[in-house]
Structures are given as structure tokens and as C-alpha cells.
Amino acid sequence: MDIPIEWYLVLSAFLFVIGAAGVLTRRNMFIVLFSIELMMNAVNVNLIGFSRFHDNVIGQHFVLFTMTVAAAEAAVGLAIVTSLFRNRQTTMVDQFDLLKG
Amino acid sequence: MEHEFASYMNWIVPLIPALPLTAFLVTILFGKWFIKEQAHWLPILAMAAAFVLSLLVWWEVRQADEGFYVELFTWIPVGDLQVPLAFYADRLSTAMIMMVTGVATLIFIYSKGYMHGDPGYYRFFSYLSLFAFSMLVLVLGANYVMLFFGWEAVGLCSYYLIGFYYHKTSAAAAGKKAFITNRVGDFGFSLGIFLLFVTFGTLTYTEVFEAVEVEGAGTATMTAIALLLFAGAMGKSAQFPLHVWLPDAMEGPTPVSALIHAATMVTAGVYMVARSSVIFASSETAMLVVAGIGAFTAIFAASIGIAQTDIKRVMAYSTVSQLGYMFMALGVGAWIPAIFHLITHAFFKALLFLGSGSVIHALSGEQDMRRMGGLRSRIPYTYWTLLAGAIALSGIFPFAGFWSKDEILGIAFKDGAYIIWAIGLVAAFITAFYTFRLIFMTFWNESRMEPEVEKHVHESPWSMTVPLMVLGGLSLVGGFLGFPPEAGVFHHFLEPVFEPANEILGIHHEPFGGIDLTLMIVSVAVAVSGVVLAYFFYVRQRDLPEKAGSAAQPLYKAIYNKWYIDEIYDATVVRLVIDGSRFLWRSFDAAVIDGIVNGVGKLWEVSGAAVRPAQTGKVQNYAGVMFAGVFVLLSAVIIAYGL
């Protein structure tokens, strides 16, 4: 029995909102980065679901690409956070407000 | 009668102004570093060559009634207004260019001696050349635009040369005064030219005058044109009430006073009115105004001349007064005597100025006549030539001034303008008086010089005395150009130029008669009595001037202070402009304009401060706003299209 498309979408929506809430509310940069990963995976779930629904494998190709890019992005992101920490001895995002008007 | 002009006229006429222009360009570009002390050669040679060419032009022009017209190219083509760069050499402009180039050549030679060793030597000669070019364009131009160009250019040169010693505050101020006073007149002059174009659709002399004669225009229009043009002449030729700049212009070097502020530039107004004789003749009112202003200026300026102590200022007021004579003549339709007086005046007034310059040179820069005296035998060449000029200016037979001045008075009398004749006669008396007052104070009696100055008294070099002698000779014999009166060589030469104007006025020539002889005797008697009175005042009984001065204290003070004209202008016009400007500066510029400009700046400053808190610098705030935006957009799409 196939899992209906709505289940995928609901799961994806939950994951996305959890990720978004994390990005907006958590002060630790690592948590923010993880939340971004979570939002991206919500998108991946969506893609897989539609791929099944349409019987089209292209969606799964996209997911593989997204995961590769996400890995690269995570590497760059963690490097930036490390560098920031070395400069300011903190990883709290609200400490970085040089552009305050 | 159509006359066939020789073909070389096509290039010699434009060459006459081109020569001094070339001299100017070369001298101003290379003078400072290369030509230096030799800067006089090129301008003198250029002027002399221009004089020779002028004689050639005269040789051609005297054979024809019409003038010679040569067009080089279209200078200003704007719609209906087509202004060609063209020259027009008729008998009037030929008479003018001969006078201008001749007198200028002599004064250039004189300047070689006078300006010797001046740090601005090359600058002086380049400006003089530029002036000569401008003046020649002024008199040779074939339309009012070229006249106007020359008119403004001579004004510019006058400004440069009055302020030649620019490090002196008074010289710089005098230059500005001359320039600004002339602007007043030129404002009217340019309006006159505009009105001329609007009325007749052309600015070329021959076409304008033909249109005036054939079609004409309303009397009101003609009066307006004539009076507006005359406003320009009043400024340039220093007629009351715009005469104030000329006496101050004496701050310039003496050759400049002689060339620009006595012989040539200031006569431009007379030339312009004579050139526009047809226009002026078409309006009785304008003629009356010209005659009235001229007569008033003649006596007004002469009266000031009595009490001045600066040798050059006496001459300056004399020039204003003599220009008044010329306008008086123009106003009664005596065109040819006016031009005749212009030419003879150029001879003797250039002589008088150069002679004064020679005196000043001999006295190491002293200009106050109260500290001169006894120079008769010390600088004899200067004395005798200056005496010739003085006799000519006083109008004593047979010197040049006698013939021209007497003719003006004679025509005024025969014309029935007795008031003008009487004013002219009184002015002639005053002229003779102040001229010989100058001679007696400077050359006669005992020396009143400072001992230091007295030691260095010396006759001027040949480059200064030779021009004096040539001009002295011209002052002696120049009048015979106009002999017999009203029918001389000069009159016959200029007659065709003024025929149209005379036709409009209905003037015809009466032969020389007994009445003329009587008038001549009267005017000579008046002049001689002026001289005799000066002799009594300044040689015989030298306590008389003081007695007379204290007897008529208020009158003496008034003329000594030039009738307070400068003070009146200061109190009214100048004060008004300065106070008005200051009021506008403070109340309008500083308050309103600056208020608006600063207000605009302030607006952005304030509104920026109001929205600045939105920029927290915290990434999460920005992200929150972004998410909210996306949420709103998505909601809108969903609501609009349904789920």
C-alpha cells in the first residue's frame, strides 16, 4: 500500500517549521546551522514524496544533489563559525551586530 | 552714381583692424618672456601700417558717394537674424579710421618713452593694440552688431588700462566704476538695437537707413530707438548724468588718457549718433534731448574744470565738456561740424594730455598744479606744444578748435537755438579760463615744486616730444580742413553721408555771410577775455582766486566738489544697491534659500533617525522579517487562488 502524498507533505511542513523556528530563536550558531539542515531536509522529503507520487525518478536525483551541496555547505558553515569563535570567543549570533544602525 | 572700387579694397579694409589684432596676439603671447623691452616695435609698426592703409582707403572712398562694403562671412545666423562679419568704409568711417590710426600711431610712439622701464611694458602695448583693433572694428563695422562688439571691446580695454596699475586700490576702483557706469548706458543701447531689429528686421546700416527713409516707423518708435541708442552714447561719451567715470579714469597711464579717454573711445558715442543721423533726424524729441544734454554737459563739466587742481582732472572735465559740444552740434543737426570738432578735438586734446604727461614725467609723477610753476624755460618743447593745444582748445583764431567750435555755435545761432548758443558761448568762456589757468599755474610764475622734485626736472625724450610737435602742428593747421567755414574740404568730403538726414530735417546750406563773421568775432572775443581773466587771476593778482573763492563760498565749494554728483550717487544709487543687496543677502539668501537647502538635508537626517532602529544588525531579526514576508506573500497567493 502506498503512503499517500499528504503524509509526506505534513511531515515536511512540520520539519520545515521546526527548522525555521530554530533559525529564528536559537542563539547558538551551531543550532542555527543544524536548523537550516533541518529545513533543507524538509524540502528533500517533499521532493521524494512528489517523486513517488508522479512515478518520476528525477526528484530523487535532486535529493542526491541537495545532500551533496548540504554537506559542502555544512563544511563551509562550520569553518566560518570556527573562525568567528576564534575572533570573538563566542558562538552566540546576537553578539554579532556590527551593522546595527 | 555707382562707383567701381579697386579690388585691393577687399583685403586692405579688413586688414586695417587685423594688423593691431595681430600685434596684440603676438605681444600678449610672447611679450613676457621673449619680446620684453622691445614690445613697442610691433604695435607701432602695425599702427603705422594701418594708417597708411587708411590713407589708401581714403584715396578710394573720396571718389565715390557710397561706401565700400565687404563681407567676410556670416557671423551669427539665427532665424531671421543674419549678422555678417562685414566692413563698411564710407566717408564717415574713413575720416574716423584716419584719425584713429594717426593719433594712435603718435601715442604709441609717445608711450615708448613714457612707459619706459615699467614692469608691465609688454602688457601696456598689447592692451593698446587690442584697443586699436576694437576701435577700428567699431568705426568700420557694417552693422549695429559689429558696432556693439567694438563698443564693448573698447570698454573692456578701457577697463584694463584704467586699472593698469592694479596694485593701486584707487585705479582698480576707477576701472570698475568706468565699467559699471558704462553698463547703465549699454543696457539702453542694446535695447535700442533690439528695437531696431524688431522694427526693421535688419541691422545692416545701409538697409536700416533705407528702411527708415522709405517706410519709416511711427514717431514714437523712432523716438524710442533714438533715445535708447543715445543712452549708450551718454555712457560711452561721458554725458551728464553718466559722466562720473571719465574723471576717475585718469588713474590710468597718461597715454591711455590721451588715446582712449580723450581722442578716440569717448568719441564713439558721437560717431554712433552721427552714423545713425537718419534715425535721430526722424525724431524731433530725440534731437532736442541730444542737444539739451550736450549743452548742459558742456557748461556743467566746464564749471567743474575751474576748481580742479589735478592737471589731468582739469583735462578730463574739459573732455566731458567738449563732448557735450559735439552732442550739442548733433542735436541741432550740425552733423559735419560735430565730426569736425571730434577730429580737431582729437588732435588738441591728445596733445594736451600727452603734454600733461610730459609735465608729469618731468616732475617725477607730480600731478598737483599747486606744486608746479615756473616750468616755461625748464621744459620748453612741452611748454610750447602745450600752449598750442591750449590755444586750440580755447578756440582762438586760427587754431583748430576755433574753426570747429565756432561753426557749432554759428549753426546753433542761425538755427534759432539761441539758448543753446548762449550756453555754448558761456562754456567757451569758461573753457578758455580754465585752460589758461592750467597753463599759468603750471608754467608761469615762480616754482612751487618740492626741492627733491625740482632737482630732477628734465625735458622728455624725443619719442615723447616728436608726437607732441606733430600734434601741435595739427592743432595749428588742422582747422583749415574746414576752411572756408561750412564749405571746407572736410565738409565736402562728408556731405554725401549726411544728405539723407539733412533732407529729413530740411536743412540747406546758407553761404558764409556777415552774420558768421560777427559771430566769429564774438566767440573769439569771449575766448580772449577768458584768457585775460585767467591772466589776472593767476599771474597778476594772485590773491584774487582766494578772494573770489571766499566771496562765493558755497558756489566755490560746490564746483570744487564736482557739484556733489559722486556724493549724490553714493547716497542714492550706490547706497540703495548695497543696502538692498545686503537686505536680500540676509533676509532672502541666508534665510529662505539656505533655509530650503538646509531643510532638505535636515528632512533626511530626521527621517533617517526615525527608521534607524529597524536596522538591529542581528541576523535573526532580518531572517524573521524575511520569513514573515514569505508567509504574507504565500497567504495572499493562497487566499487569491484558493487551496
Image (cartoon, rainbow, N blue to C red):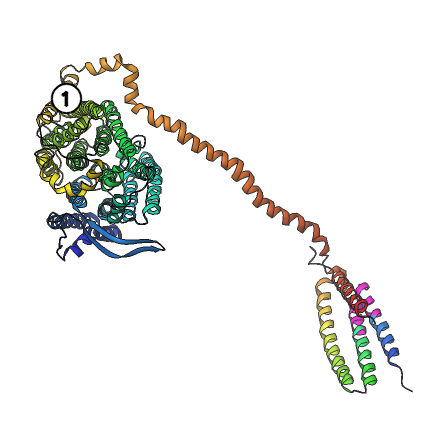
Which residue is at a point 85% across and 76% down the rendered structure image?
Answer: A9
Q: Which residue is mark 1?
A: B526
* Nearer to me, B71 or B311: B71
Judge left or right: residue B236 versus residue B397. right
Output the chain of dot 1.
B
Above or below residue B248? Residue B557 is above
Which residue is at a point 74% across and 72% down the rendered structure image?
Answer: A78
Judge left or right: residue A40 versus residue B228. right
Which residue is at a point 22% across and 32% down the rendered structure image?
Answer: B332
In percent of width and height, residue B105 lies at: 15, 44
Residue A22 quadrant: bottom right
Above or below residue B621? Residue B31 is above
Judge left or right: residue B121 versus residue B169. left
The residue carrying pointer 1 sits among few (fewer than 14), some (14 to 19) or many (20 or more) residues within 10 Å by Cα, namely many
Residue range in magenta is A17-38
Which residue is at a point 21% across and 16% down the rendered structure image?
Answer: B545
Residue B473 showing in the rendered view: no
In percent of width and height, residue B437 lies at: 17, 23
In percent of width and height, residue B317 lies at: 24, 29
In percent of width and height, residue A57 lies at: 78, 87
Q: Secondary structure at mark 1?
A: helix
Above or below residue B393? Residue A1 is below
Residue B98 showing in the rendered view: yes
